Image (tube, helix red, strand yellow):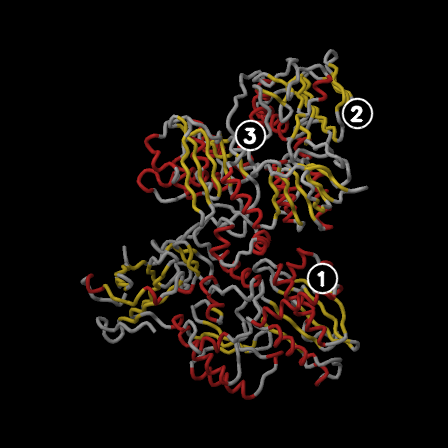
Amino acid sequence: MNANVSDLDLDWRLIGTIDDIPQQGARCVENGATKIAVFRTAADEIFALEDNCPHKNGPLSQGIVHDGCVTCPLHNWVISLSTGSAQGADEGRSATFPVRLDGRDIYLNLNPGA
Amino acid sequence: MSRQKLVIIGNGMAPGRMLEHLFEAQGAYDVTIFNAEPRVNYDRIMLSPVLSGEKSFDDIVIHDDAWYADNGIMLHRGEKVVAIDRDAKTVTSEGGITAAYDKLVIATGSNPFIIPVPGHQLPGVIAYRDLDDVETMKVAAARGGRAVVIGGGLLGLEAAAGLKAQGMEVTVLHLMPTLLERQLDPAAGYLLQKELEGRGIEIRCGANTKQVLGTDKVEGIELEDGTVIDASLVVMAVGIRPNTQLAKDSGLEVGRGIVTDAQMRTSDPDILSVGECVEVGGMVYGLVAPLYQMAKVAAATLTGEAAAFAHAETPTKLKVTGINLYSVGDFGDGPDREDVVLRDAARGSYKRVILKDNKVIGAVLYGDVADGMWYNEFLKSGDCVEAIRETLIFGQAHQGGGVAADPLAAVANLSADAEICGCNGICKGKIVDAINDKGLTSLAEVRAHTKASASCGTCTGLVESVIALTLGDSFEKKAEGMCGCTTLGHGEVRRLIVAKGLKSIPAVMQELEWSTANGCAKCRPALNYYLLSDWPTEYKDDQQSRFINERVHANIQKDGTYSVVPRMWGGMTSADELRAIANVVDKFNIPDVKVTGGQRIDLLGVKKEDLPAVWSDLNDAGLVSGHAYAKGLRTVKTCVGSTWCRFGTQDSTGLGIKLEKFLWGSWTPAKVKLAVTGCPRNCAEATCKDIGVICVDSGYQIVYGGAAGLHIQGTTELGTVKTEEEVLEIAGALTQMYREQGFYLERIYKWADRVGYDTVKAAIFDDLASRRAYYDRFVISQENSQTDPWSERVSGVDKHEFNPLAVFGKADAATSMEPAE
């Protein structure tokens, strides 16, 4: 992780508005070498995951978003947007990042969640 | 030791179920069955799906030949019993077979009631009762014309919907003022009538049939008011009569049905009776749940166990796809009753719960029927609902402070004796016990052991929820549908999209009752394709339902970079094109350049953010997207043909280019690859392509349905034509037929294997009018699809796709937020 700011409050960044991301789609945020995928669901919820599938590092931001999950474009693993965990029989987890909405503005915390 | 002899007259669902209970209890009987029908035991509840084409006969067989053999049952098919000798304890069939019994079960069922109006014996007047009737209807439907269904009850309406689905014009005549008056109140009957009329079924209530017209076959119907309706088929579905003749002839007590006590014994204690022929407690029954209860009681009586038949209200459902109604109990008006009604006109839903002394005595639901079971539980328990009266009508999800409408939670809240499967009377506790005791892990196993959801199948979702709750995460839902979101298969979904005029993904999911809020990565791309294919001028492509390759017009590679393939028409290129490609490779540091198997060039390892600029440079040189990523036309491979080759018979390169320019841009169920080869030496390998053209001296031989991937299969010949124009027309028509009928991800060869090569040939090659119609539809579709996606993207469409939303941690981590676009 390249973010070396330790004060958590400083790590909340305004990254854009909800209108910048298509419904059931994703956009990426780059933080140094780390790519973070920011997802918007059909119900306008926002989630952020490291843009790497736990299976073979596929870019999750390029997958199809459905029912709180994203299906990886490489081998169809289904990853939960809220927990980052692989669904079904697959095992593995992608790092999640805290996000919050203030009006239509999206704030992302660059420190991965627990 | 000599086993007791059990003889059964009739082989329907009730005695079949009775035998299952008997064998389960290891009742020691030698069993002989006489069946007037020449078939094994099948599920009559499912005749309607067989009529509408959603199921086949094999799908609805309950007991196959092996079951009779395994259980040592002697089954006499097509042998109608004509006499019972109660003194000698024997029965004798029409064919002269006599069998002795210790115990006899009469299960002769019922006969459909045919209104004895003039003309009722004409050929073309039928009932709706068994598989023969369904076959007759299907044959009639194939000839087209109008069918008149007399009777707007459950069976009549299912028959009407099935005949409509088979392509007939349909009129329903109903004597009463509203449909299903025994199951629905007038308000719900109105909604149902509106829905059916919206599907093109004509409904005439208050219609009294005077006579059936025709001389040697049905030609029409005349009503009492003088109205004449032309018809080639008349289906009478006005009711059933218990079939009691044999019992009456044998001197047994008969009222409306064969009279039995609560143990299912007739007036002769060695003779039992089950099914629709029975009158028990003064009632006769036609729905399956009470018949199955009779079966269970009879099996207990035969094994010496104590059991008694008890009347219970049976909820009603109509098995017509897309129509949801549920009614139970008593819903007549009365001064001592109170109604709670909720209507939602926009959603076409209607809910009415009838209370008496603060207890639920009936419910009628139309549209939103999810709470039917919940109301039925109150009805059965007789619990006082005063405390929840205010919110009762809003349903279970609104109880207890706004619980979210989670179906799993709703099932979790049901008590152990809550009925899950109405047909078979299976409660939640029984399913849970079976899962735990027998280690069941799948829907199929639960069906096999408990019968839950094994009859009409409408409770399949509930049963799955019970399994999921019992097994927790170890239950993997094995859906039979196109994905886990629906139980419908691809064919049914395609048919219903057209039949119901569904024109958006949300509409499909709503009307076809998707079990998930917005589908999954399997069904969404398929639905997007079906809608695009069926409504080419109206449907707006949903980018978020496309796989990434089709969203960014390039092929994702294992490291997240993309490969870019420009089109080279018919495999031809030029120095200018090659120079442009070379310049792009240098400018964007593209690591690999490869010649593909489809006669073009693949640029591998392009970064996503470079894609628009790469396309822009290629566009400038006249190169467009090769759709190497698409479920659509990929390449048309050619040889050099008569232009250069000393064996070439025709201009195969030129024809290949024409085909590619005509077909490119169309979306298809799976990828489509063509080849045109200049002579039968087949250098362009046309005989393993989706569509191939082999040039010969006299013209062009067209072949299709080849495969050379996981599966290898040579093509099948479609026919030979004389001109290039005919080749183009046939290729377009064939592609269109495949577009309209193929299942998503099903290649042409699989589609043709499924529908039959003869069918395809007849529609595309032999029948010129049909060929033209497909061709015309293809041309219309192409008018909306031949836009180069690269130039569209270069011009700014969905530009956001390629830029990061924000970049941090490069120069100054604290301030480097960049604008989104």
* Residue B209 % position (x, y): 68, 37
Q: Which residue is mark 3?
A: B289
The furthest residue to the left: A7
Q: Which residue is label 1 attached to?
A: B763
Query: Whole-Å distance between the Cαs marked 1 and 3?
Result: 46 Å
Identity, as a three-letter code, of the amino acid under mark 3: Ala
Cβ atoms at labels 2 and 1 below 8 Å apart: no
| Amino acid bearing label 2 | Glu
Are dots 2 and 1 on a single chain?
yes
Classify residue B554 as left or right of residue A98.
right
Depicted B191 relative to depicted B117: above or below: below
Q: In the picture, residue B9 is in which quadrant?
A: top right
Residue B437 visible (yes or no): no
Rendering quarter of residue B402: top left
Q: Which quarter of the rendered picture does the C terminus of chain B lie within?
A: bottom left
Q: Which residue is mark 2?
A: B94
